[in-house]
Amino acid sequence: MNAKTSAGAGNTWRDLPAAQQPEYPDPEALRAVIADLESYPPLVFAGECDQLRARMGAVARGEAFLLQGGDCAEAFDAVSADQIRNKLKTLLQMGAVLTYAASVPVVKVGRIAGQYSKPRSKPTETRDGVTLPTYRGDSVNGFDFTEAARIPDPERLKRMYHASASTLNLVRAFTTGGYADLRQVHAWNQDFVKSSPSGQRYEQLAREIDNALNFMHACGADPEEFKTVEFYSSHEALLLDYESALTRVDSRTGQLYDVSAHMVWIGERTRQLDHAHIEFASKIRNPIGIKLGPTTTAEEALQYIERLDPEREPGRLTFIVRMGADKIRDKLPELVEKVTASGATVAWVTDPMHGNTFEAASGHKTRRFDDVLDEVKGFFEVHKALGTHPGGIHVELTGDDVTECVGGGDEIFVDDLHQRYETACDPRLNRSQSLDLAFLVAEMYRDQ
């Protein structure tokens, strides 16, 4: 990796309108931070991004399934070893369920080590007659409702880099140092199995995996693949100053990679075809995702393919569909039909979280587990009817026992929301709900 981008190669977006960017009061301070970031080492390597693109190619061709999950918005004060391990453990458990129960290779990608920024529907927030800039994630400003906290501070971009680096360092240690060994399937569940219906169901599956591993071992087979796990990082490429400061020329190929994460995606609020985010994404070689909401037309989807995947390379482009449980069955079929007819091979993934948010009487933003599940069901039904591949799920989840979404096997009621409502932004599935979802998705996948 060369230390810096070639002059301006990754900065063609600067001439275009860019939605959802912070207004920093001191442009000179921002320039100094960007110059520092440009000198920092890569967080991921171009070869790893290529590897994920190959894995996503298998997803697009119908040979694998994507499990992408993690926090709505990461927080600087939530990068302890326990918090990172709990998130990873939940994803490893979901991956084990999907791999074993659905008999499909699972590509594991975290919303992790960079998901510190959030697009917002309004630039300001008013409480008790006081209006302040909205909270845009720890990478931009503070959560506290004070004037000082809400001023965008470019120094936070450096904190995001360091928090991402320490998170990735620990994730790499866990995934290659024995913790992710499949023989640990019981250990991932010890604190959880007695109290939770989904934990007990998982324990039964873990016993079956154990038996299968013991059988293979007795036959003289002990593949290295069981001892480590491939785990990739991803986040929304929202703050273009940060993303382009971490864009580098790959010394092997001369091509640009955003080395802040293996995969980045463009959100529903920043996917304007003639704006900066699409332009930025068109220049980098990472696997790219685009969130498609209910207003997306088939023509737009085809234009995204033209701009971001002109070579029609399976694994380059993932459409992450977030329609809402009430719209998915109406809106998705035309998109899938027309994209398939165009000859492009994209990965289709459902995000059943973002279209199903509502405000409870208590004022908490929440989601019903049944709505999340219904959107996933609709996604699978559409693909089954069209004979296409339901490529994966993209969920906001945590490894902690929070009370943010209502429902699930270990049911949370609206009156429970206040007990452990800890998200900085959107409500997440807790560990029990995440495992429930994995079992239900495995069943749907087997029925395809």
Image (cartoon, grey):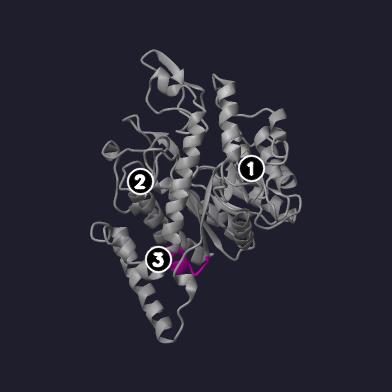
User: Are the residues at dot 3 and dot 1 in contact (C-beta closer than 8 Å)?
Assistant: no
Name the residue tied to disc 3: 178
Q: Say whether residue 219 is left or right of residue 57.
A: left
In the picture, the disc for residue 427 is none
Q: How far apart, in angstroms, are the residues tagged by discs 3 and 2?
A: 19 Å
- The residue segment tinted magenta is 95-105
Label 2 element class: loop
Q: Which of marks 3 and 1 is nearer the N terminus?
A: 3
Check the picture and name the quadrant holding the C terminus: bottom right
Q: Say whether residue 352 is left or right of residue 246.
A: left
Name the residue tied to disc 1: 247
Q: What residue type is labelled 2?
A: Ser
Q: How far apart, in angstroms, are the residues tagged by discs 3 and 1?
A: 32 Å
Label 3 element class: loop
Q: How far apart, in angstroms, are the residues tagged by discs 2 and 1?
A: 27 Å
Q: Is residue 183 visible?
A: yes
Name the residue tied to disc 2: 80
Q: Is residue 269 visible?
A: no
> Which residue is more in the foreground, 137 or 419?
137
Q: Quadrant of residue 22?
A: top right
